[in-house]
Image (cartoon, rainbow, N blue to C red):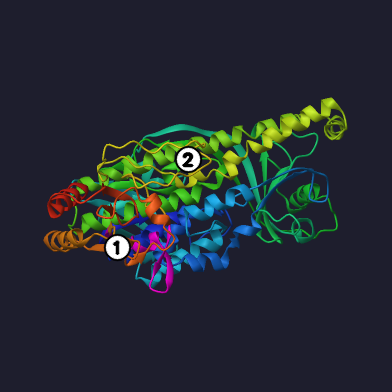
């Protein structure tokens, strides 16, 4: 049997499910397959940043995700200690919760970060997709995939019955993870390294409330004498406050594989809890590798990569599933525009142009964050192969009232502050800058800031940037400027002097057969800038406009009224859509 569809999505993790939900929302006929019988069966990725929550806001599921996730205020503390019951070594406020960073995060987005482990996040995205009619086939694996000038042919197998089927699609997306069959069979070129480290994820239940409720957080780093930091005692990742966890332990395969018997895992857990009376229940254990890989291109002909199939890196910075979801938000509207005939196929080239540099940045930042952990163990005086006695002595000396110890504490403090590049990297999380054939550059420079661009996000309306957030008033409702755009449609954001732009939008929308909304944002506009916040950051006049894509990215900017608004808008839209 042959199934005909517009888009075949291979994989149903965060990237594949988000893509499926968006394509269904946009009315695209698509089939999604996954070899697994269900959504994720373990926590895996968990940090969910503001930009990803904005995607879920666009999909209408932000509240659902927030309801099942751990809220931002319970993610506050990163704790370094010898054990939960043992000596605390250092602490850092993270994920936008430090007093000096809260305003940055709140000003940048209407959405808050949260901790949404993959096994509770994926069902929320799946529900949105199925409610909108998405065709998602679990227990169905990809056997082979090929393409020609007219489409993609995939042979798929039902893993329960063994029956095979042929899927013929106009386009396909490999969102099938780090061992992507799509990437392998079609020979997508990759750059980077694999096997840079090995780790265990031990999913367990243990009630550690009394050790956490006074210092709530997502990550608890246990560093014990006798162990090098990264091949050492373990990192506790909170899944459910504060009774469910993943214990992450690094190990050296050259020294042999770790004992993963239940008895050994419980012993390992108790070692870093420091309290043998805490009951530990092992739920599952898995092994994984640290990789530093990114695809050189995200497109080959009619096939694309998204998520871990395209970028593979350590969990540092919590960017993995976030980048995956954002890949799909970028790609979905472009596929919808092309398969419906509203855009030329060249629009799809912008996916690699925009997302591959982001993937490369994320992979490099995550790897750098791993390397930047080393100064902590150096400051502690811990080393691989060190005797336990020497390690405890070094730790005792660290907190001694001597000048030498004070110098070591200064070095420890510096090492901990360096972790802001992992745990408060707001510029990395939100500051994507797109340069592509789906953005019309106005020749202006990207605004410079006197603050570190990795740590701090700088709002701008330069084409290629996501539209900035500001709270505005719509009737009696307070809404974000982000709520005025997106949802699968182009939007022309104008100031209050917009009669000419309004007429131009109506004329060009009818002429090109595309949905083009008008959002008048300004003082006493339809979206009333009562706080004057938008006026300060918009970088256009009352008679100017911003053309915002369905993924909320600014595609074109006109600072003031054009001599011929209709012609200017027509030129912009036909250029962006490659009409």
Q: Which mark is residue 362?
A: 2
Q: CA distance from mark 2 to mark 1?
A: 33 Å
Query: Residue 179 or 411: which is nearer the viewer?
Result: 411
Q: Position of residue 574 (x, y in %)?
A: 16, 50
477 in the magenta segment: yes
What is the quadrant of residue 251 in the picture?
A: top right
- Residue drawn at point x = 26 percent, y = 61 percent: 5
Q: Position of residue 28 (x, y in %)?
A: 27, 63
- Residue drawn at point x = 57 percent, y = 66 percent: 68
First in sequence: mark 2 vs mark 1: 2
Q: Is residue 255 visible?
A: no
372 relative to 496 in the view: left or right: right
Q: Badge 2: how crowded within 10 Å, few (<14), some, or many (20+)?
A: many
Q: Which residues are magenta?
A: 470-492
Q: Badge 1: how crowded within 10 Å, few (<14), some, or many (20+)?
A: many
Secondary element at tag 1 = strand
Query: Residue 191 or 435: which is nearer the viewer?
Result: 435
Secondary element at tag 2 = helix
- Extreme residue in the bottom direction: 476
552 shown above or below 440: below
570 relative to 16 in the view: left or right: left
Q: Which mark is residue 519?
A: 1
Mark toward the viewer: 2 or 1: 1
What is the quadrant of residue 168 in the picture?
A: bottom left
276 relative to 293 in the view: left or right: right
Q: Position of residue 304 (x, y in %)?
A: 32, 47
240 shown above or below 144: below
260 in the magenta segment: no
Query: Residue 341 or 192: which is nearer the viewer?
Result: 341
Q: Is residue 483 visible?
A: yes
**Quarter the N terminus occupies:** bottom left
Q: Position of residue 214 (x, y in %)?
A: 76, 57
């Amino acid at each position: 049997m042959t199934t005909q569809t517009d888009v075949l999505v291979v994989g149903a993790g965060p990237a594949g499910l988000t893509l499926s939900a968006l394509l269904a929302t946009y009315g695209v006929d698509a089939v999604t397959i996954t070899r697994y019988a269900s959504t994720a069966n373990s926590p895996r990725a968990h940090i969910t940043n503001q930009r990803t929550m904005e995607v879920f806001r666009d999909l209408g599921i932000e509240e659902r995700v927030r309801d099942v996730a751990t809220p931002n205020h319970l993610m506050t503390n990163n704790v370094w200690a010898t054990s939960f019951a043992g000596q605390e070594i250092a602490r850092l406020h993270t994920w936008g919760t430090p007093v000096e960073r809260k305003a940055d995060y709140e000003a940048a987005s209407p959405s808050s970060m949260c901790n949404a482990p993959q096994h509770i996040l994926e069902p929320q995205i799946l529900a949105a997709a199925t409610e909108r009619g998405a065709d998602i086939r679990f227990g169905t694996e990809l056997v082979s995939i090929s393409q020609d000038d007219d489409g993609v042919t995939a042979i798929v197998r039902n893993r329960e019955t063994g029956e095979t089927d042929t899927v013929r699609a106009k386009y396909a997306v490999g969102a099938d993870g780090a061992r992507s069959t799509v990437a392998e069979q079609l020979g997508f070129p990759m750059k980077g390294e694999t096997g840079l480290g090995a780790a265990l994820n031990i999913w367990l239940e243990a009630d550690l409330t009394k050790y956490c409720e006074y210092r709530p957080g997502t990550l608890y780093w246990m560093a014990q004498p006798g162990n090098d930091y990264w091949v050492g005692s373990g990192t506790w990742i909170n899944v459910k406050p504060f009774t469910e966890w993943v214990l992450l332990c690094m190990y050296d395969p050259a020294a042999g594989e770790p004992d993963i018997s239940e008895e050994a895992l419980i012993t390992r857990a108790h070692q870093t809890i420091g309290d043998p009376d805490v009951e530990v229940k092992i739920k599952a254990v898995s092994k994984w590798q640290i990789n530093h890989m990114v695809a050189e291109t995200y497109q080959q002909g009619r096939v694309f990569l998204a998520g871990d199939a395209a970028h593979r890196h350590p969990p540092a910075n919590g960017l993995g599933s976030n980048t995956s979801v954002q890949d799909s938000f970028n790609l979905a509207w472009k596929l919808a525009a092309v398969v419906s005939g509203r855009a030329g196929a060249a629009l799809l080239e912008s996916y690699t142009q925009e997302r591959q540099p982001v993937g490369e940045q994320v992979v490099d930042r995550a790897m750098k964050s791993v390397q930047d952990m080393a100064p902590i163990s150096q400051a502690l005086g811990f080393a691989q192969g060190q005797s336990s006695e020497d390690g405890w002595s070094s730790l005792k000396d660290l907190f001694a009232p001597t000048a030498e110890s004070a110098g070591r504490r200064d070095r420890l403090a510096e090492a901990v502050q360096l972790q802001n590049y992992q745990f408060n990297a707001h510029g990395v999380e939100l500051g994507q800058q797109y340069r592509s054939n789906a953005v019309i550059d106005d020749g202006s420079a990207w605004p410079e800031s006197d603050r570190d661009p990795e740590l701090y996000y700088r709002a701008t309306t330069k084409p290629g940037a996501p539209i900035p957030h500001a709270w505005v008033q719509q009737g009696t409702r307070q809404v974000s400027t982000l709520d005025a755009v997106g949802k699968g449609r182009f939007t022309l954001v104008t100031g209050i002097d917009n009669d000419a732009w309004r007429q131009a939008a109506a004329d060009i929308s009818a002429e090109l057969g595309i949905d083009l909304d008008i959002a008048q944002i300004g003082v006493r506009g339809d979206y009333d800038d009562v706080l004057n916040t938008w006026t300060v950051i918009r970088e256009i006049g009352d008679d100017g406009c911003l053309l915002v894509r369905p993924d909320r990215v600014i595609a074109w900017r006109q600072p003031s009224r054009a001599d011929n608004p209709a012609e200017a808008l027509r030129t912009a839209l036909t250029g962006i859509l490659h009409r």
